[in-house]
Image: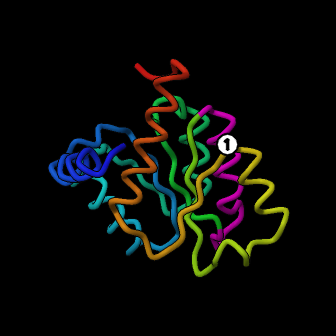
Amino acid sequence: MNNANAVERSRQLRKGALRMRILIVDDNKLLLKILTRTFQNLGATVTWFDDSNDAISQLRQVGAEFDAVISDYEMKENPDGCSVLRVAHESGVPVLALCTGREIDDFAKEDLEFFRKIDAMILLKPLEPRDCATLLESCNFKRRSDGKTD
């Protein structure tokens, strides 16, 4: 995408052109509220959970209805975010993993292998909404090109 197209796309996203169904899972309720509002303002329909068990249940029931799942990776409860990501992946939904306070070099080897295995995109906190929107659009494009949307 050339610079002029990138600027135009950024302007469109600010106007609410992100038409996706997103599931967000995080045990931090403030961050959930911020992410939900941010993506709704970008035009997405958002379902959120602060409990990984509830999120997993929802994914098992209607996972294919989502265009992307954004889940915290390091959650305090059990099952953790890793379990949410696995179920999302099994449902065929593109996964973005939110990771708190880590740099890529700080991940354990098995964590990075897991992300690679499920083709997850890693988002490091703090998040920039435009960056998230760009990644979500790539998830949506991948699902469309795989024939996995309405």
Instruction: Identify which residue is drawn at 55% across, 50% down.
Output: 55
Name the residue at 42% across, 70% down.
Answer: 127
Residue density around tag 1, few if under 14, some if 14–19, many if 20 or more, within 10 Å:
some
> In the image, is residue 125 above or below residue 122?
below
Q: Which residues are magenta?
A: 74-92
What is the three-letter code of the residue carrying label 1?
A: Val
Q: Which residue is mark 1?
A: 87
Please tell me which residue lies in front, 4 or 143: 4
Screen quadrant of the C terminus: top left
| Way the structure is coloured | rainbow
- Image spot of residue 37 (x, y percent): 27, 61
- Give the percent coordinates (x, y) of residue 106: 73, 78
Q: Is residue 75 magenta?
A: yes
Which residue, as the protein is rendered here, is positioned at the far bottom? 101
User: Quick one: quadrant of the N terminus?
Assistant: top left
x then y, percent, for residue 14: 19, 54
Q: Secondary structure at mark 1?
A: helix
> Does the magenta run of residues contain 95?
no
Q: Residue at x 57, y 36 (%)?
A: 93
**Quadrant of the rendered image containing residue 72:** bottom right
